Amino acid sequence: MKQFAIGALMMFVAINSQAQSIYNVLDKLIADGMLSTAEGKVDSMLMQNPGNVDALMYKGNLQYYKSASYTDVMSLKGNPDESVYTTEYAYIGQYLETVPKAVADTIAFYFVNALRLDPTREDIRLGLCYIYSVSLQSDKVIEQLPLIAAIPSVSATSIRDYAYNILDRGAIADGMKVYNKISSLYPEDGNLMSDLAVEYYINGDIINSMNTAIKSLKTGNLDTISYSNAFFIFGVMEEYDVASACIHNWSKLQQNNSSLFYKALVKMFRNDADAKKDLTEFIAIETAPSNEKKLAQYLVSVNLDITPSDFDTIFTFGLTDAFNILISHHFYNKYPNSFSPAYTYAENLTYNKRYQEAINVYPKVNLTDASIVDLQEYHFYYAWALYKAGKIEQSNEHWLQSANSDIPYLISGSNYFLGKYYFDKSEFDTARKYFLLGANAPGDSKYAAFCSDYLSAIK
């Protein structure tokens, strides 16, 4: 028998009976893969006593194990992780068991009947909610959550697993619905709301990310991680005033000077005459040789004017996007006709999932001074922004450009997206052409592997 997440369910649904010996026998039979024998013993127990709660629990468990025993876990795949910003060959939900609804409902039948007989069995209720979550029945999970939250051993942190069980299997909308319900059960927990805001950001829902982050800030009881998360979200969204308040609170808790540095950068962006003075003051009080201090020293040394030819210098300081997007936007405004600041800002917008704004900037980038490699990367990331904004036909124009690159990752990636476009249109001959080009690109990349997967499907 394939051992398939058996431990996960047994952790939730543990035995609670004085007649332990028979259950020890059942546990050994299950561990040895003798499921039919074990189920026969359970059926006999239920014939003698239909109200045997532990036997009902075991009957439910056995339906799970029987299903798992003929499921090939290695064949389970979700949607390919297409992001141009990741390199690992992976499918969202890959190798994660999703219990078929019919099996889950059979398991639930026995668990629900057991709970009717003994509503105090918290272990069975936890198991019931687990089964609903791994079968992607979000509405049934939501029904159970208030009862789960009332269990003393359950915390705001542990209960999130039910949302993650769904999210990790690629059911993003349903997973976020569950996560929202969980957050509503802990309305004063700003840190939980902050985590929810981050999850929205990860899934590209920027509006809900910011709205949820605002709610978390209003609770007034955030830890350093939550303030840091909020600063990142509002920083990359260029909501500078809110971001400044977040980093101010974070800096107070961390007892550092980062908020002063960020405030000075915001002043620089706004062409405030005090920006250089504030950077100089930050340098004077920052005792550690931090990357922030090094960048502040550099900005002061060039009188806050990084020329386009030296613009890539900012990447050597290793700051996060919340800082970099502000700097790139400032120098894009200052040198709108120069390639590097404009392209950097457009790509920063793309990376941070602001696709519509990015595709408003890309056409304004002056390509005159761009190198061949710069042009290839420009088309690749422009195509991704268009693709994520739902402008598939337009993205193809740029995938075609970047497919002519000398960079293997760009070759395989561009041809993957072109092949997928024609595959979805059932134009398989054209799709095969692009998938072959992607699969045979030099080097190994996730896109080459995805192309091979599609070629197998076409055959």
Image (spheres, rainbow, N blue to C red):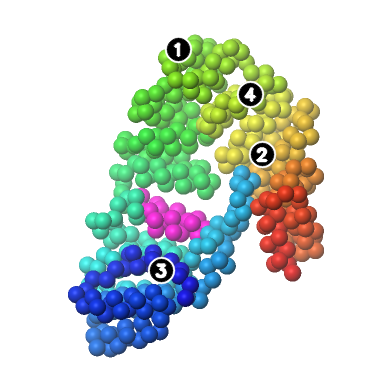
Q: Residue 6 shows which numbered tag?
A: 3
Q: Position of residue 116 (x, y in %)?
A: 25, 74
Quick one: SS at disc 3? helix
Rendered view: 127 above or below 327:
below
Residue underneath mark 4 = 313
Q: Which quarter of the image is occupied by the C terminus?
A: bottom right
The Cα–Cα distance between marks 3 and 2, rounded to whole angstroms, is 48 Å
Highlighted range, magenta = 160-184
In reply to whether residue 174 is colored magenta, the answer given is yes
Residue type indicated by callout 1: Ala
Q: Earlier in the sequence, mark 1 or mark 3?
A: 3
Q: Is residue 447 visible?
A: yes
Q: Residue at x 69, y 24 (%)?
A: 336
Q: Position of residue 209 (x, y in %)?
A: 47, 43
The answer to whether mark 1 and mark 2 are in CB contact below 8 A is no
Q: Position of residue 105 (x, y in %)?
A: 41, 74
